[in-house]
Image (cartoon, rainbow, N blue to C red):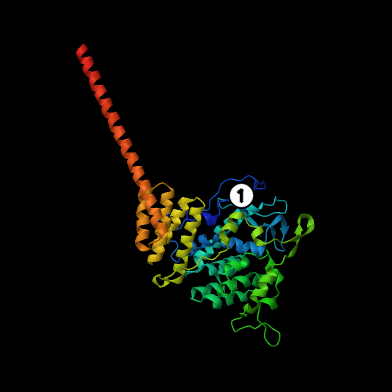
Amino acid sequence: MNDKQLRNLFLIAAGGLAVQGCSPKGSETQDEQKPQTEVVTPQVTPVDDPYGNVALFEATRSKVKFALAFCENYYEYVYFCGEAWTTGHGLTILYNADGSYTKVKPDMTAPTLEQSDVYKGRYLTREILPDIKSCIKVPMDENTMIAACVLRYCIGHGNFVKSQFVKQLNAGVKGAALAKTLTGWRQQDGVPKRCYFFAALMAGKIQYSDLLDLCAEGCYNLTWKDIFVYNDKGGLKVDKNGFCEWDFSKVRKNLETAKKPKTTKLTLNGKKHVLVECKLTKEIVPNYIWQEVSNGRAAVVAAPQNTTDFATAEQSYTCAQLNDSSYIAYNAGDYETALEAGKAALQLAQTNKEVGAANYNIGMAYFAMGKYERAVKYLRLSLAANKTKAAEGALKEAMQKRQSTRTKCGAYGLLGAGALTAMLIARRRSMMQRQKHR
């Protein structure tokens, strides 16, 4: 798959929101309030993405944004967080589309929710995605991807690249065993609290849909005794590697605790303090993110059947995600993205079931674009792999449309030929008349 084929892949996940970012680095003027269309376009080829993690990151982008909104909240202020001036969704720097940026300053105008979302998207592309691409040498599943992005956000580049999480992941450790490495970051009280639910996600103790009704910063309602296992002496149960045990026996109770509002005191410019009650996470993200991550409350795409025919379980999962992205894009009327996501899924597909699903998505995208010859081709391939009433009906309609198009083209062709003949006859008669008069 080349760059051209992937130029609009995962447009739904990327968001495509409109904003003109902050002024270039070093400039004091700001015009964030003047929006312009911007689409995040990943430039990736199979050579650049040997483990499929860049494609998975793009497919998971909205869920990562939702996870970080839960960790950080959204504030319509520029405030001091104890280390730096911050605004929006926990932003300390604001990236422009061209990669230039400026640090958040106390006299800036705070970005709107939608603008903050775009800035967060640029941050993900400029800072987190490069670390995912360069540091991780094995395929990941979606839950691991989300946890990795949350950890990278919490501890920064330097700590992430040398972390036990990355080392153990590259060594083949997965699930609950890998989630345990997240307990090693206890220097700051908030890091394990932020990571707890994502560790539970990796360990299979909860589903992504369990996170949808949590309050932003609701993790800070938890104590260490809520999230860690303690020994008989009242201390943390720590192994020889310095890792603790997550207490997942309390995960349901902790979810309820994290649904409760949390009040935060912000320090604004001039050392003014304001008390702000955090909202539900779904209320502080743009609607497109909520629609995508909730997806009718079925937030996690089920892994396809017959997965043993895939090279890895992660490849199977990624294929399912791509097919789902294609379906979402098609329903949103973005047929080009639906087409490219379907092609990416087809490239990964190994089972008859998934070949059928991918070909169906590609065929329907071509049908919606009015390219009936190609639509018929792929819908036939879909039926050959997996006969469904939906594919049969779509193929019948596509063939009818194709025939109608051919008939019109034939009629126009005959009309054109007739007109040309008449013109030549008229021209011949005119020449004969001129010669007669001579």
List the residue tagged with mark 1: 21
Q: Is 417 placed above or below 328 here?
A: above
Q: Is 155 placed above or below 390 here?
A: below
Residue 40, given in percent of the width and then of the height, sits at 53, 53
Q: Residue at x 47, y 67 (%)?
A: 317
Residue 435, given in percent of the width and then of the height, sits at 20, 15
Q: Is residue 33 visible?
A: yes
Residue 421, given in percent of the width and then of the height, sits at 26, 28
Q: Is 300 placed above or below 78 here?
A: below
Determine whether, in the image, residue 104 is placed left or right of residue 147: right
The amino acid on which the numbered mark 1 sits, given as a three-letter code, is Gly
Please state which of residues 28 and 281 is positioned toward the viewer in this rendering: 281
Residue found farthest to the bottom: 232
Residue 298, given in percent of the width and then of the height, sits at 55, 64
Circle 1 SS class? loop
Please state which of residues 349 and 91 is positioned toward the viewer in this rendering: 349
Q: Is 97 placed above or below 181 here?
A: above
Determine whether, in the image, residue 97 is placed left or right of residue 188: left
